[in-house]
Image (spheres, rainbow, N blue to C red):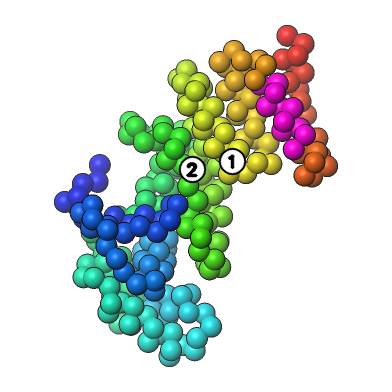
Amino acid sequence: MTTQASCPVELRLLGWFRLSRLGRPLPITAGGERLLALLALHGGPVSRRVAAGTLWPDKHDHRAAGNLRSVIWRLPPGLVEATAAVVALGPGVCCDVADLVTRSRRLIGGTPGTVPADLDPDRYGADLLPSWSEDWVGIERERLRQLRIHALEALTARLIETGRYHDAIAAGLSSVAADPLRESAHRMVISAHLAEGNRSEALRHYDRFRELLADELGLEPSPRLTGLIRQLQGG
């Protein structure tokens, strides 16, 4: 478990940008926010040239490099470590994205730890910096969205196995909210309803999904899902 002593600065990028030191908000410039987000999402040192070119793609190299120097100079001490060649997050900065990736991979791999947060559906619900429009953020946002959806589906299955049906349905619905046309997410919700014995809820959810799929894409659910429902109706 991370403590304030080992990680005094907390960087949050899921939902919206938040930065705090020892629990207190730490204001920085907009350029500083972008730099910290870039470094956190990269997961390691970034060359100055790559950082400058990513953050100021419309500037010449010399101007972009100058902007990067200015942003680094204005940041409070300890947030970044910079050399003549690279820049990286300081060792005392922890980011919620890294935590999300670790928990998601444990779930998808089938080996979640005993940390309660691993089995909390609310921990997988927020998009990466949804109000930011930069291309590099959009790419990372989609990558993390796909990871979250797979984690939520794995979480739904695990919660069904342990009899936590209410939480399983919540996790399944979160994956549906992240991608309303994703059949596997809807299948997990239906499976959770069936595991709880709520056949009518399973059928209602299936009907809503079938209508949505027809309206949006002109498609029918897959044989795998329709077979599940036919078996239910004939049981």
Residue 10: which quarter of the image?
A: bottom left
Queried whether the magenta region covers residue 128, the answer comes back as no
Would residue 156 be seen by someone viewing this image from the given angle?
no
Residue 194: which quarter of the image?
A: top right
Q: Earlier in the sequence, mark 2 or mark 1?
A: 2
Residues at marks 2 and 1 touching, judged by CB atoms closer than 8 Å: yes
Q: Residues within 10 Å of mark 1 (few under 14, many from 20)?
A: some
Q: Position of residue 163 (x, y in %)?
A: 47, 17
Q: Is residue 4 left or right of residue 97?
A: left
Q: Residue at x 26, y 66 (%)?
A: 79
As displayed, is residue 119 above or below residue 198?
A: below
Q: Residue at x 72, y 15 (%)?
A: 232
As displayed, is residue 235 above or below residue 129?
A: above
Queried whether the magenta region covers residue 208, the answer comes back as yes
Q: Is residue 43 left or right of residue 215?
A: left
Q: Position of residue 233 (x, y in %)?
A: 75, 14
Name the element at disc 2.
Answer: loop
**Badge 2 is on which residue?**
125
Main SS of the magenta segment? helix
Q: Which residues are magenta?
A: 202-212
Residue type marked 2: Gly
In depth, the one of 88 and 64 nearer the eye is 64
Q: Position of residue 201 (x, y in %)?
A: 65, 20
**Badge 1 is on which residue?**
177
Residue type marked 1: Ala
Q: Residue at x 54, y 49 (%)?
A: 145
Image quadrant in which the C terminus is located: top right
In depth, the one of 22 and 97 nearer the eye is 22
Furthest residue to the left?
5
Q: Residues within 10 Å of mark 2 (few under 14, many from 20)?
A: some
Q: Residue at x 37, y 47 (%)?
A: 99
